[in-house]
Amino acid sequence: GQYTVSTRKNVRILLVGDAGVGKTSLILSLVSEEYPEEVPPRAEEITIPANVTPEQVPTSIVDFSSVEQTEETLGLEINKAHVVCIVYAVDDDDSLDRITSHWLPFIRSKCNASLEGDAETEPETEAAGERLRKPIVLVGNKVDLIDYSTMDSVLAIMEDFPEIESCVECSAKTLHNISEMFYYAQKAVLHPTSPLYMMEDQE
Ligand code: GTP
Ligand code: MG
């Protein structure tokens, strides 16, 4: 049709990623439009009113802290979120490796777990092989610290994980690409480019 109609009335964005990559700094930089030198372990949940978001939809932004929250809470937050931003630090290869070794499989496992309840009632249906996938945005923070790009590695990851909608390199410190990052997350929910349901055996 001529119009893309989204029925979603709000967007809930969750930030995850290894400790120290800058999740809390990114959220507080967006909100205050300046870089906070000191940040708490976890930012309070904030909701940005529709009229100041690019897609005109009220948008909640949720931080995660492994110090203040349990893995069980994280599982619940992943299921409540409409999109998950996996944050890494561009100057920290370990945080980039952990996207594929930990975060993407972990998020998939949490989404699968939430479907298993449904599968119990009709285990032999076609839907049993189908898995719900949460749209993901990969966020490389701290670009102010390096003079190269991590995009080659990130594009390789995106080939293996179709739920990744987009990727962005940014800096909470210089505010580079900060509003873009949250716009990409909104867009991943409101105008997803890949199907969010995929057959389990599809390669
Ligand atoms: P946890 O809450 O421990 O999971 O960490 P976090 O991901 O919330 O990271 P946080 O925002 O606490 O930032 C960690 C450190 O990185 C702090 O010292 C920040 O000042 C610093 N930092 C965050 N963003 C940037 C950035 O864009 N550039 C630079 N140079 N430093 C940053
Ligand atoms: Mg934090």
Image (spheres, grey):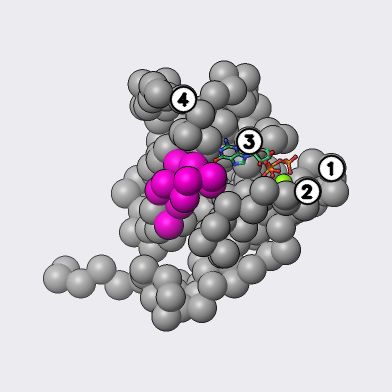
Q: Which amino acid does label 2 sit on?
A: Pro
Residue span colored magenta: 170-179
Q: What residue type is labelled 3?
A: Val
Q: What residue sits right under mark 2 in the picture?
A: 41
Q: What residue sits right under mark 4 in the picture?
A: 146
Q: Is residue 203 above or below residue 17?
A: above
Q: What residue sits right under mark 1 in the picture?
A: 67
Cα distance in 3D space between marks 4 and 2 = 25 Å
Horizontal and vertical percent for residue 12?
A: 57, 63
Cα distance in 3D space between marks 4 and 1 = 28 Å
Q: Is mark 4 on a helix, strand or loop?
A: loop
On whether ligand 1 comes within 8 Å of the CB at mark 3, the answer is: yes
Q: In this view, does 197 lie above or below 45?
A: above
Q: Nearer the viewer, residue 99 or 169?
A: 169
Choose the circle earlier in sequence order: 1 or 3. Answer: 3
Q: Which residue appears at 59% of the width and 72% of the height?
A: 47
Quarter residue 7 falls in: bottom left
Q: Which of marks 1 and 3 is in front?
A: 3
On whether ligand 1 comes within 8 Å of the CB at mark 1, the answer is: yes
